[in-house]
Image: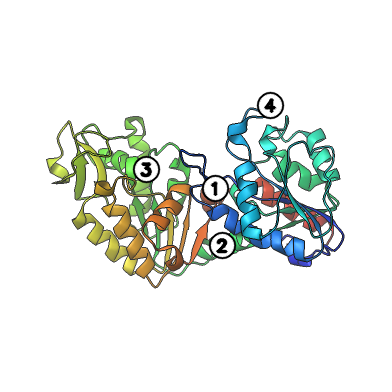
Amino acid sequence: MKFKTLDEMALIGKRVLIRSDLNVPFGDSREISDDTRIVASLPAIRQAMSSGAAVMIMSHLGRPKAGTFQEEFSLAPVAKHLSSLLGTNVPLVKEWTSGVDVGPGQVVLLENCRMNVGETDNDEALSKQLALLCDVYVNDAFGAAHRAHASTYGVAQYADECCAGPLVVEEVNALTKALASPKKPLVAIVGGAKVSTKLTILLELAKKVDHLVVGGGIANTFLLAKGRNIGGSLAEKDLVDAASAVIDQIESRGGKIPLPNDVVCAASFDQDAEATRKRIDEVNDSDLILDFGAETMGEIAQIIKHAGTIVWNGPLGVFEFDQFSNGTRVLSQAIAESTGFSIAGGGDTIAAVTKFGVTDKIDYISTAGGAFLEFLEGKVLPALDVLEKRANETN
């Protein structure tokens, strides 16, 4: 994948519009609960500022209704946190599509771009307006690269110059390393509630990986496909055939999906629910499977230990509740201790990596969720595709 990078741009005195991914989670008191994406966005911002550019940062937050200002989706807390991290005041500009007042070496944050009518529709008129704001457009939002929106795609079509930021370059390089010519064995871990949201990636990975570990509600659906009783556990019974197809695909290549022999169950999905370890054939109709058991995790840890490349998206159990967190904890530690190249992505995965203290032991942590999965699947990401097309125009 070839596109221009920020290092190639002459920025002094230029108006630089950076599309960052500052879509961070918040706690109950409206405080940022995880600033991973903000911190990951700093190198591009600092580079543009130190190069003498007038810097405008553009991002979305959540899914606000376009055309109206909604306080709960305001980037005001992000502006405050950015000011602290950068050591300089970062004003939040509420009305900005018609022009922004910012000088060389200065930086402003533009209010949630999804509040603009036409943003998610990739409206041509809005895209041209965004392009007029800048001399150089920088896409540093890999987490939104799978969206063909005005701020990720349309503006890149019309801006005088455009390039990829350092975070996008890092993400693409890391994912390419994990997939294009991975050191074997290649192990993928895919957790989550529903097979339906990750079916295509599971089918694609089954063609490539040596071992595929599935967790959460996905694992329950796969257990059903193997004829196991999962009680009242979360699963998608209508996708049992799809799960069987994934199993057949990987097993036909000599690969393996290590489904649990033992699980941790509860009578209810509750923070205070009592955890009970059971063999999989002991699960009764009233049980809820909320984590993998110790024996199964020992087997999975051995697979991870001998892996050459590890790709991780999604926890194995309800790790937010301590009594159901052991599976994801053991997985995290096994990946951290592995000598293989490891890459982890997705919001829940980042939360797990943080909770179990292995952040600095994962080779690369992706800020993306949906884009991470679609890249793994081999899909064309629109925001990267337009950067590549623009680069080819000038060659």
* Structural distance between the alpha carbons of marks 3 and 1: 20 Å
- Vertical side of 85 occupied by 198: above or below: above
Q: Of callouts 4 and 1, which one flags the residue occurring earlier in the amino acid sequence?
A: 4
**Label 1 SS:** helix
Residue 169: image location, x then y, percent: 64, 61
Q: Which mark is residue 176?
A: 2
Q: Of callouts 2 and 4, which one flags the residue occurring earlier in the amino acid sequence?
A: 4
Q: Between residue 96 and residue 90, name the one nearer to us.
A: 90
At a point 85% along the width and 57% down the height, the residue shown is 14
Q: Between residue 262 and residue 254, name the one nearer to us.
A: 262
Q: Does any portion of residue 144 appear in the rendered image? A: no
Q: Of callouts 2 and 1, which one flags the residue occurring earlier in the amino acid sequence?
A: 2
Q: Residue at label 1? A: 374
Q: Residue at label 3? A: 245
Q: Amino acid at mark 2?
A: Thr
Q: Evaluate if marks 3 and 1 touch, with contact meaning CB atoms under 8 Å apart.
A: no
Q: Residue at label 4? A: 68
Q: Amino acid at mark 3?
A: Ala
